[in-house]
Image (cartoon, grey):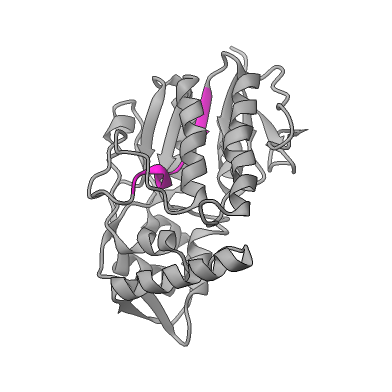
Amino acid sequence: MSRPRIAVTGASGFCGGHVARAAATRGADVVCLGRRPGPVGAFRFWDATSGPPDLSGVDRVVHCAAAVGDPLPGSGAEAQMRAVNVDGTARLLAAAGDRPVVWVSSASVYDPRLDRGLVREDHPRTGHLNAYGRTKADGEELALRAGAVVLRPRAVYGPGDTQLLPRLLSRVRAGTLLLPGPDVRLSLTAVENLADACLAAPAWPPGAYNIADPQPYARDAALHQVLRAHGVTARLRRLPLGLAEMAARTAEAVARRTGGEPSLSRYAVDQLAHTVVLDVSRARTQGWTPHRSLHDYLASCTA
């Protein structure tokens, strides 16, 4: 039996790099698509904003490439983000034809105004607080219509993470980390769990699937563990939610005048202030099992 040839977009990035390495470890021929080479396999240049990718000889596609950040809806930065997350998706899907496509989305597509105590895949995808959630929702809609498998992780972390945990650690000021509102339960996604899903998903029925660690985490306890594992001495203080939201609205107003990203946003507050637990039973019915946890990752940080 010939080795499968898997194209991974965004393979020079955090999630895409893990998917590419995992695919190579399992015996696949990997083609890395993007503006920079990936960690393994062949490299084909592709700028998602300017043309179709070269998928010649490829059997299946895992689309991890995305523009990330926290720009406001309607800002100039949203147009740039849309060029990658929506228009780039359209280019990829057209080039893929009838090849299986796995499209890595985000739990940020879910409506934050509704209860998220147990979020299933049919949760409404409206009311987005920033351009990232809005463009990911629009991009995945194209993917779903094309018959792709769409994966929705939340707060992906792990070796090589340059966004989630580093940004949290950077918020420590004078030995204090301010958190909005009371303690809550949050789903997180180890990048290894996401990579496993990406490689299994071409065999799944088309549609959307939540991807997260085996159990949600208590926010404050998890952050205490993160701080200790990284050698950061800090205490957690809870800021009243109303005050945090007011500060975010002020920062957003300043950002609208300057054209930049806000130093604090309602999206950032929302991500930490409200319980968000993903129901992963649909992915589990396909045989996928999340094996990694935050404890595993932090143990490797201190080893």
**Residue 303 visible at all:** no
Give the x, y percent position of residue 251.
49, 71
Does 118 sit left or right of 21 as displayed? left
Q: Quadrant of residue 226?
A: bottom left
Q: Of 101 and 261, which appears nearest the observer?
A: 261
For residue 102: magenta?
Answer: yes
- Total numbered labels: 0
Does 144 sit left or right of 24 as displayed? left
Name the residue rendered at 71%, 26% in the picture: 52
Give the x, y percent position of residue 153.
42, 43
* Extreme residue toward the front, this view: 257
**Residue 282 visible at all:** yes
Q: Which residues are magenta?
A: 101-111
Name the residue rendered at 29%, 27% in the picture: 285
Give the x, y percent position of residue 35.
74, 41
Does 160 sit left or right of 184 as displayed? right
Q: Of 249 and 7, which appears nearest the observer?
A: 249
Q: Is residue 231 above or below residue 124?
A: below
Name the residue rendered at 68%, 43% in the picture: 39
Q: Is residue 51 above or below residue 40?
A: above
Does 239 sit left or right of 300 as displayed? left
Give the x, y percent position of residue 140.
48, 33
Q: Is residue 278 above or below residue 273?
A: above
For residue 109: magenta?
Answer: yes
Name the quadrant of the N terminus: top right
Q: Is residue 30 above or below residue 302?
A: above
Q: Of 134 and 103, which appears nearest the observer?
A: 134
